[in-house]
Image: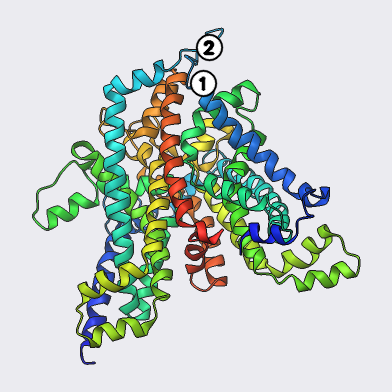
Amino acid sequence: MTARSLTRARPRARVLPITRVLPLAPALALLLLFLAGPIAYCAYIAFTDLQLTGQAHASYVGLDNFRTAFTDDGFLNAVWLTLVFTVLSSLLGQNTLGLALASLMQRASKPVRTLTGGIVITAWVLPEVVAGFLLYAFFRREGTLNALLDALHLPRQNWLFTLPILAVSFANVWRGTAFSMLVYSAALQEIPKEITEAAEVDGAGGWRRLWHITLPMIRRSIGTNLMLNTLQTLSVFGLIWVMTRGGPGDKSQTLPLFMYEQAFQNSMIGYGTAVALLLLLVGALFSAVYLRLLRTEV
Amino acid sequence: MSRRPTHRLAADLALLLVAAAFCLPLAWVLLSSVDPDAGLTVRAPDGLTLGNFNAVLTTDVTFRPLLNSLILCGGGTALTVVCAALAAYPLSRFRSRLNRPFLLAVLFATGLPITAIMVPVYALFVRIDLIDTFQGTILFFAASQLPFAIWLMKNFMDGVPKELEEAAWTDGASAFQSLTRIVLPLMGPGVAVVTVFSFVMMWGNFFVPFMLLLTPDQMPASVSINEFFGNRGMVAYGQLAAFSVVYSTPVILLYVLIARRLGGGFALGGAMKG
C-alpha cells in the first residue's frame, strides 16, 4: 500500500487541515531543534577552527580540518581500527554467531533454548557501561580468561594490553549478538518446513541446505541485520571507553573515541567535528542502504 | 528419523557451550557482589556477605545517581512516548502525500550514529545555555529516541482497525478523543514496548549524559559508576559488582515484563526488522 496511489485516488486532499498536522508538531519541533539542528551545526563548525578555550571568534578555514585529518596518523589509525572493530565484531562476530545460535535453537530442546536465549539476551539488555566492566574484568591480566587459560595449560596474555582491539571486539560480540539472534530466529521461523524437508529427502546435507535454501530465503533479513549491526557498532563509545579508554596509546582508539579526544582533550572542537561529520556521512550511507532494503515496506 | 535425537543432542550441547561462555562475565558480577574479598576472577565466594551492598547503598553512591537516572530517563521516555503517539496518529490514519517522505526521513534518522553528533550538540548546548541542565538532557534524549519510537508506534497503530474509530467519529468524538480513548488503549502492548524500549535505551546510555552534564551531583548511574575507578588506585571490585547489580536490575525486570507480554521477546526483533 503506497501513499502515492492513495493520493492519486483523492486529488482534493492537497490542503492539509490544521488538525491533521498539529499532532506532528511536538515531534517535529524536537527533531528539528535537537537532531536536524545539531547536524546542520556540525556541517558548519567542521569548516571552522572553533576551539574550547578563549578564542573570540571561530573563523572559516575551508577544508583545512579534512586535509589535516587525512594526513593525521592518529585519524588514519582510528579509521583502520574502526574498520577492524566493525568487521570483527559486527560482520564476523554478531552476525555469524547470531545466525548459528538461531539455527541451533530451531533444533534444540526447549529448556536449553530458553536458557541460552535468556543468558544471551541478558548480555544485550545490560547497560553499556556495566557490560564494559564485566568484560574488563574478564580480559584483565588477573581476570577470568587468563584463569581459564591457566587451567587448560595454555599461554596467558595481558589481553587489554597486547590485543586491546580484539578484546573490545569480543566485548561487542558478547553484548550485541542477541539482536542478530532475535532477527534470525524470526526469519528462520518464516521458512516453510516443507521446503527444508523436501531438500532433506532429496539428500541435501546440512551445509548445502544452509547455502542453497536457508540463506537465499532469509537474505533480506541478513541485509537488514548487517546494516543495523554496522550502524550500532560504528557508534560504540561507552564500551571501549570503560574497557581501555582507547588505549594503551591509541591501540583501540576507534573514530568516536578519536573524535572525543580531539574535541575535548585537545580542545579542537572544529577538528573533532570534522571527524564527526565524516563518521556521520559513513553512517548516513549505511542508513540509506538500509532504507533501500526496506523500500517495499514503507 | 533415527538421526533426529542425536541432532537435538548436538544442538543442545553446542548451545550450552555458548551459554556457558556468555555466562562467565555474568557469573563474575553476581558472585563478586556477595564476595567479601572479590577479585577479577570468577570463583566461589570466600563467604556470603551483604557488605558490598551495604557499602554502596548510600545517598552519594547509589540513591542520588539512580534518582537522577530516573528523572532523566523517566522525563525523556514520557516526552518520547507522548510525541510519538501524537505523531503516529496522523501518519497512520490520514492519507497525505507527506506521509511517505516523513516516514522515510524518520527511518533514515533511526540509523544515524548519535555518537557522531554529540560534539556539535555540546557546542550548541553551550551556546543556548542548556549545557549541564536536566531539561536539556531530557530534550536531547527524547529527540534521539523519537525516530525509532515514531516508527514503532506507527506500525503498532496500523494494527488497530479503523472501523472502531469511525463509530466514535459518527458519535461526534474528535480525533484527539478517539486517539486517547480508543486507539491507545487498544494498542496497550505496543505502547508498553515503545515505553520500555525507550526507557531501557536511555537508562543504559553513557555518552549523552557524559557529554551534556557536568556537575557530579547531577550525574546518572551510567556515568557515576566510573567513580569506582577514580584515581584512588585500589578498586573495590565487590562494591563495583554490587552497584552494577543494583543499577542493572530495573532494566532486566522491565525487559522480562514486555518479553512475557509479547511471547518470548522475539517481537522486538520482528519489529526492528520493519
Q: Is residue A261 above or below residue A13?
A: above
Read off the residue under disc 2: A58
- Please name whichever residue, B236 or A246, is drawn nearer the observer in this view of the structure: A246
B109 or A105: nearer the viewer: B109
Q: What x and y, as percent, mark residue A81?
A: 28, 36
Is the C terminus of chain A in the top left, top right, bottom left or bottom right quadrant? Answer: bottom right
Give the alpha-carbon distance from disc 2 to disc 1, as whole Å. Answer: 9 Å
**Tags 2 and 1 in contact by the CB under 8 Å rule?**
yes
Q: Residues within 10 Å of mark 2 (few under 14, many from 20)?
A: few
Coordinates of residue B111 in the picture (x, y in percent)? 48, 46
Q: Chain of mark 1?
A: A
- Is B52 in front, or is B143? B143
Q: Which sits earlier in the primary sequence, circle 2 or circle 1? A: 1
Residue under the image location 46 percent in, 25 percent down: A273
Amino acid identity at mark 1:
Ile
Q: Which residue is mark 1?
A: A45
Amino acid, disc 2: Ala
**Residue B221 at x, y percent in the picture:** 52, 42
Q: Position of residue A97 (x, y in %)?
A: 29, 61
Q: Quadrant of residue B250?
A: bottom right
Q: Chain of mark 2?
A: A
